[in-house]
Structures are given as C-alpha cells and as structure tokens.
C-alpha cells in the first residue's frame, strides 16, 4: 500500500495547479470537522494541531490516490484515524485497546440487563444536561468506542462510510456503536445521579 | 364515556430488546435497511421498553449533536499548513525532476 502510494506519488496524475485546486476545494472545507475529530480523539489542543497538520500533509503527499469527486471527507477522516492509531495513540495515557470480548460478554450476558441498566436514565435527564456533562461522558469512553460515536452522532457519517474509515465490516460498525452507546448511557446515568437529575423512578 | 376509545395494551417486557435496540439505533442513524424501517414502523407502538429506548436514544443523539461544543481549527494552524504545503510542493517537484534526470542518465 505504502509502496503503491509512493509510486503514484512520483508519477503524478494531477498537475501542480490541479493539486492545489483539489487541496483547496476538496480538502480545506473539512478542516474544522477534522480538527474537531482530532480534538475529540486526543483531548489536547497541541496534539490536535499536530495530528491535523500531519494528516493534511499526508493527504497532499498522496493526493494522486484521491479520486476527485469522491468522498473527500471520509478519505481525510480515514487518514487522520490511521495517523492517530500509528503515531498518537502510543503517547496517550489511556488504555490503547478495548477488550471487546469482555465488553461483549457483559452486555450479552442477559438481554434484560441492558434494559434494567438503562431504564433509570430518563430522556428528561439527558435533555436537562449541559454540553460539558455530555462531553465528559463521551471523553470517558475508551477511544475505539468514542470514535464510532463521534463519527456517527457528531459528524453524521453513515454506517457504510464509517466501515470504510475504520476499515471494518458494517456489521461490526453496528455492534460496536451499540456497545459504545450502552457504555455512554452508563456514564450519563452516573452523571445524572451525581448531579441530582430526576433520573430515578 | 359515550365514545369509548380502544385501549391498546403495550408489551411491558421485550423478549428481544438488545436486537430491537440495534435496529432502533440504525433507524435513528439513517442506516437501517428497508425491511428494518418497515418492521420499526409497524411494531414500535406495541412495546413499552422499545418506545422508551427509542426516546432515550433520540435524546442522547440530539445531545451529542447539539450540546457538545464543536472545536474550530485555529487560523494560525491553517496558515502554517498552507506554508508547509507550499514547501512540500516545491520539494516534491524537485524530487520528481531529480528522478527523471536519474532515469535519463541510466537510459542513455
């Protein structure tokens, strides 16, 4: 893959002018979304700036492997996600990998468990929460689960687009989102209890 | 009293709640299949846990979308990036020319 991209890189399909035009018209409009994604992944402004710049420089370097008119945002998000995994996740203090099997076991242990664990979190409690509380709950999730929620709920990607960005099957996107949301509900319920929202029946 | 309404009895327990919630989430995310959308429309009103689950998922999704601050890229980062792109384009051009020169030398 790396070699293929290098080959493309030394045999440019786009002229210099076209490269600048594609960069400005197709890539730059997504810079705020990309920065927001970087910030939600790293939780650090300096790291977000570095990650964003690395991503855009890579995007420019491999611009010949981008097909003009296709989904530039998804293409850029995929590069950013890969850069984060390869270069930034190692620096992160949080656990790098989620034990999916463990989480799956917890949530599959009983079908009733899910309903019982979320039933005391009420719609009104969530509506009463402020952004900081929702953001803290999201930040408290392991990064793999946080990523699917950011891509789906904040950036509005479809499951198909997420599957391409994350390089996983659509079925895995779906089940990972489901588990991520269960974990998020646990966090929100804890906040609701702590803050004294009217969550208990 | 003269116009008695039909009382619908909703299920108080969902025997397949986990699968239902996956489907409900897919509907809310706009990624459900036509069959799932049809199933959702025809059955959602029958099951209390699913109705409550739908409302809760919807409010969380809206909270994530609308309440969390969206960070914007600082202008100085944009400016720095443009400078770096200009420099990298120059280097790229130099490398391409250099490779072509090497190819010409080896061909001759």
Image (spheres, coloured by chain):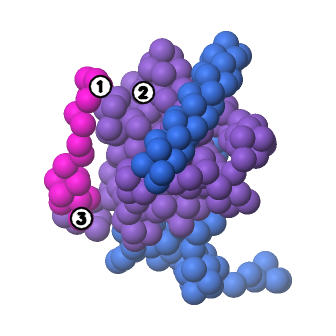
Chain colours: A purple, B blue
Q: Is residue B81 left or right of residue A138?
A: right
Which numbered disc flags the more N-terminal residue, 2 or 1? 2
Asked if the magenta segment contains residue A103, the reply would be yes
Q: Is residue A166 above or below residue B26?
A: above
| Label 2 sits on residue | A42
As measured in the structure, the alpha-carbon distance from the residue carrying label 1 to the one carrying label 3 is: 29 Å
Query: In front of the other: label 3 or label 2?
Result: 2
Drawn side of residue A87 relative to residue A80, left or right: left
Q: Judge whether A166 appears above or below A42 on screen.
A: below
Asked whether disc 2 touches disc 1, contact meaning CB atoms under 8 Å apart, the reply is yes
Q: Counting residues from the N terminus, which is met first, the one under dot 1 or under dot 3?
A: 1
Residue for badge 1: A92
Position of residue B105 in the picture relative to residue A67 (left or right): left
Q: Which residues are magenta?
A: A90-108
Apparent side of residue B28 relative to residue B47 in the rendered image (left or right): right
Which residue is pictured at 53% across the width and 40% down the height?
B101
């Amino acid at each position: 893959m790396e070699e293929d991209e290098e080959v493309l890189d030394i045999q440019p399909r786009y002229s210099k002018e076209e490269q600048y035009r594609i960069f400005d018209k197709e890539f730059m409009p997504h810079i705020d979304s990309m920065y927001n994604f970087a910030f939600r992944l790293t939780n650090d402004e300096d790291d977000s700036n570095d990650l964003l710049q690395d991503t855009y420089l890579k995007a420019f370097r491999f611009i010949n492997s981008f097909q003009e008119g296709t989904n530039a945002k998804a293409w850029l998000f995929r590069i950013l996600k890969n850069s984060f995994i390869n270069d930034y996740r190692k620096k992160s203090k949080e656990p790098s990998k989620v034990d999916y099997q463990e989480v799956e076991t917890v949530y599959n242990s009983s079908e009733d468990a899910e309903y019982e664990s979320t039933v005391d979190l009420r719609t009104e409690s969530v509506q009463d929460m402020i952004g900081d509380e929702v953001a803290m709950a999201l930040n408290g999730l392991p990064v793999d689960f946080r990523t699917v929620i950011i891509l789906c709920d904040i950036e509005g990607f479809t499951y198909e687009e997420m599957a391409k960005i994350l390089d996983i099957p659509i079925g895995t996107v779906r089940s990972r989102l489901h588990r991520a949301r269960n974990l998020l509900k646990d966090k929100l319920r804890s906040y609701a209890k702590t803050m004294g929202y009217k969550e208990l029946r | 009293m003269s116009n008695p309404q039909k009382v619908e009895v909703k299920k108080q327990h969902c025997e397949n709640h986990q699968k239902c919630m996956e489907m409900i989430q897919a509907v809310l995310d706009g990624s459900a299949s036509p069959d799932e959308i049809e199933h959702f429309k025809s059955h959602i009103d029958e099951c209390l846990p699913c109705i409550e689950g739908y409302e809760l998922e919807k409010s969380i999704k809206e909270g994530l979308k609308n309440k969390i601050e969206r960070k914007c890229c600082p202008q100085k980062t944009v400016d720095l990036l443009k400078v770096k792109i200009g420099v990298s384009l120059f280097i790229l051009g130099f490398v391409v020319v250099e490779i072509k020169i090497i190819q010409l030398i080896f061909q001759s």
